[in-house]
Amino acid sequence: MEDGDKRRFARVVFDSSAELNVSGHRITGQVHDVSLKGALLITEDNFDNIQLEDSGNFEFTISGSEITINMEIKVAHLEPHRIGVECTSIDLDSASHLRRLVEMNLGDETLLQRELHALLISSKES
């Protein structure tokens, strides 16, 4: 099964600079896509010392605004120049902004409601 087949949350293509702090390392790059439960970071930075399941912080600013989304994460997958992160915790303001960002890009209220429901269920399972 490919990575995309295991995803429970639709990802929206999103381009913004981002910073990942994990295992004592600061990695900068561009957000490639984002969902209610994670993101994919594209980077040229060296991240040889990062392992799957490492935890840290992921932050990005919505382009054209001063809105910053900040989430606690764990590393979900690694491949050359790409780090996939899964959100483990997010503050209310960041969650509201992320929801709005996904909502605007999905353009489907039914799909958004399904995703919010899945997010609540996955949070309860954790």
Image (tube, helix red, strand yellow):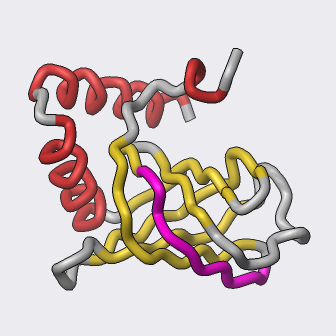
Residue 30 part of the magenta-drawn span: yes
Which quadrant would the C terminus be assigned to in this image?
Answer: top right
Nearer to me, 10 or 81:
81
Q: Residue at x 47, y 29 (%)?
A: 122
Nearer to me, 15 or 114:
15
Q: Main secondary structure of the magenta part?
A: strand
Q: What x and y, as percent, mark residue 12?
A: 34, 44
Q: Quadrant of residue 6?
A: top right
Q: What x and y, as percent, mark residue 42?
A: 59, 63
Nearer to me, 57 or 77:
77
Q: Residue at x 77, y 82 (%)?
A: 24
Q: Is residue 78 above or below residue 59?
A: above
Q: Is residue 71 above or below residue 64?
A: above
| Left or right: 95, with 65 as reference point | right
Q: Quadrant of residue 90?
A: bottom left
User: What range of the chain is rendered magenta?
Assistant: 24-33
Which quadrant would the N terminus be assigned to in this image?
Answer: top right
Q: Residue at x 75, y 82 (%)?
A: 25
Q: Residue at x 36, y 49 (%)?
A: 13
